[in-house]
Amino acid sequence: MTDPTSSPLPPPLMPPSGPASPAGSRTSAFFRRVDPAVATAFACIVALLLVGSLYSTRFLSPDYLLQQLQVGSFLALVATGLMVVVLLGQIDLSVPWIVTVGGMMSTAAAGHGAIGATLAIPFGVLCGIGFGLVNGVGVAYLRVPSMIFTLGVDAVAQGLMVLKTGGSAPQDMATPLMRELATGRTLGAVPNGVWVWLLVGLAVSFLLARTTFGRSFYAIGNREEAAYLSGVRTRQVTLVAFAISGGLSALSGALLAGYSGKAYQGMGDDYLLPAIAAVVLGGTSILGGRGSYLGTTAGVILITLLQSILSVVQMPDAGRQIIYGAVILAMLLLYGRGRRVGG
């Protein structure tokens, strides 16, 4: 018989419940926002630096790293423009000869006295924008697949440059401003090319993340029909995207001409596959609708370091092309499978 005066057993002790600590919430939210592809790219950068340091301790020196950023700034400009197009689910294969157009037309303008030297870089960039607008009209308004149309524009640009020079090497030289932007170090030890890359990157990041127009790139890449029905001017956005790609490719060509002292035939041929590889390595889906500029930056640094290490081990160009192609195919399979499952 139970004693009525006895008290019941106390409930078992339980861990205190309540909201998670602010620090824990912030940490978990941060890891949820981190793109696995971007994190992987940065991890590969660290791994490449460690591998490179096994060959020479110079790989970890500030001078070497700044030099690699300077070399990577040319690729970064091309990859930035290409990323904007890829976000739409399109591709720009006219990059190689638009880079050449930028370099050759900038140096050509430089041969027309002081005014030409002053307007050399803007003139080269405007020529690239012009080719980009042609790409945009063909893809957005004529509805020709971007892979076919931009490849045709690349051939046209090549023909025009060969016609201009008669098939021989251009004789025009880069302006002092072009050389200073490409090789100089006006502000401290950081090369001027890196500052150009930084300014362009900040502008594109702001466009994509902070403006309605920039967010429409993602909307079109995810589903163009839905974006159009939501009021997005899909044709105008596509036109602007290809103009950005053409302008930045031409700017890269102008800086390349400054780096080497003059423009030359086919100076952009080595930038198409590395630029595509940098974009997809950074987590931008080659099917469109997903990507960040931080990821593209990581991809550019990764490809630049990879090129440096392959040069040290004397990897032939054929081997490099195989590596870039394998990277693109692997990322395409990864994102393609994800898009089908999600759809």
Image (cartoon, rainbow, N blue to C red):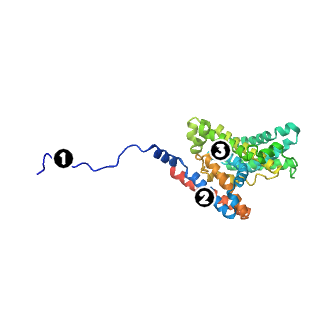
Looking at the image, do the residues carrying marks 2 and 3 touch, with CB atoms under 8 Å apart? Answer: no
- Residue denoted by label 1: 7
- Apparent side of residue 16 relative to residue 213 in the rendered image (left or right): left
Q: Position of residue 27 (x, y in %)?
A: 49, 47
Residue shown at 77% from the left, 49% from the top: 97
Mark 1 or mark 2, whichever is nearer to me = 1
Looking at the image, do the residues carrying marks 1 and 2 touch, with CB atoms under 8 Å apart? Answer: no
Residue shown at 55% from the left, 52% from the top: 36
Classify mark 1: helix, strand or loop. Answer: loop
Between the C-alphas of marks 2 and 3, the distance is 21 Å
The foreground one among 120 and 22 is 22
**Kind of residue at badge 3:** Val
Q: Earlier in the sequence, mark 1 or mark 2?
A: 1
- Residue denoted by label 3: 84
Looking at the image, do the residues carrying marks 3 and 1 touch, with CB atoms under 8 Å apart? Answer: no
Residue shown at 21% from the left, 49% from the top: 9
Between the C-alphas of marks 3 and 1, the distance is 72 Å
- Residue denoted by label 2: 330
Q: Earlier in the sequence, mark 3 or mark 1?
A: 1
Residue 151 seen anywhere in this rendered image of the structure: no
Q: Position of residue 110 (x, y in %)?
A: 85, 42
The residue at the far left in this view is: 1
**Kind of residue at badge 1:** Ser
Q: Position of residue 171 (x, y in %)?
A: 88, 49
- Badge 1: few (under 14), some or many (20 or more) residues near its Cα, within 10 Å? few
Classify mark 3: helix, strand or loop. Answer: helix
